[in-house]
Image (cartoon, helix red, strand yellow):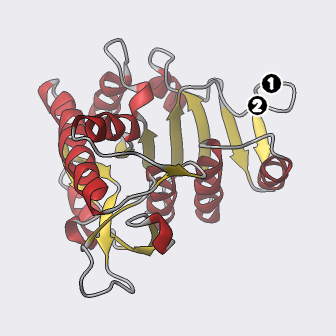
Amino acid sequence: MKDITVIKIGGSTLGSRDTTIEDIISLQKKGNLLVVVHGGGNTVTNWLKRHGVKTEFVRGERVTDLSTLEVATAVLAGLVNKEIVASINSRGGQAVGISGVDGTLIESKMKNPEMGYVGEVVRVNIALLETLLGAGFIPVVSSISLYSVDRPNSASYLININADPVAGYLAEALTAKRLVFLTDVAGITDASGAVVSRLSADEAEALITSGVISGGMIPKIRACLRALSVNAVTRIIDGRRPHILIKELEGQDGGTTIYRE
């Protein structure tokens, strides 16, 4: 349990020509301990449209009322999670799909009542992950989590969290060796648009403050900074490149490394 890699994958990096699943299976068969965390916001948006539920975003986060939460749970903890698990298992890998609710993996509270059922992590309980890893399975984790802190009696026990910080919290709790974000960009870019191969924690904070880094990249960097507290290697790489995960674990190839000085 001392050489765990946490991999965050988003829907934008999983397609018909994608090699991520193939790489995950290959790495597992070579003895690597992997934990996969996935998003799926675009799929949630499409299903909300099908059900006539309006989607509203504030500062990049989805306002989540009870109807939206129900669809998000069905899509993320159900459809998206099981499609990834089925892809792994049908090709010879061994994976189990879970959410933050299972085994009380991720306990959360509501971030802002105005945003609805949008949570932030309070506690991580890794017993279930350790059991699955010890039994030879890849845990595939949806970030639908347990609303257990400061929950009103009438509220749902479910809450949705951005999968990026969840990956950081899991890497920290597992004392992971690596945290790898598979994205649809080549890496973190500077003000000129050039990919920065290495970025210190302080430099990353400065780029956020200046506005050079914005939007969905910010929670990824915050997650990397959290994982640095356990000395994990933190990487943001281009998940569209063929066999990038294999290349990553065999020796870094492209992308951005965030490090603490």
Residue 34, image x and y in percent? 36, 45
Disc 1 marks which amino acid?
Answer: Gly
Quadrant for residue 68, please give it.
Answer: bottom left
Q: In the drawing, what numbered circle is on residue 193?
A: 1
Residue at 30% x, 36% y is: 49
Residue at 37% x, 17% y is: 18
Residue nearer the viewer, 249 or 83: 83
Picture quarter with the C terminus: bottom right
Residue 91, image x and y in percent? 17, 23
Q: What element does badge 1 sit on?
A: loop
Q: Is residue 189 above or below residue 134?
A: above
- For label 2, the residue is 189
Q: What element does badge 2 sit on?
A: loop
Disc 2 marks which amino acid?
Answer: Thr
Residue at 29% x, 71% y is: 146
Quadrant for residue 216, please give it.
Answer: top right
Quadrant for residue 99, please give it.
Answer: bottom left
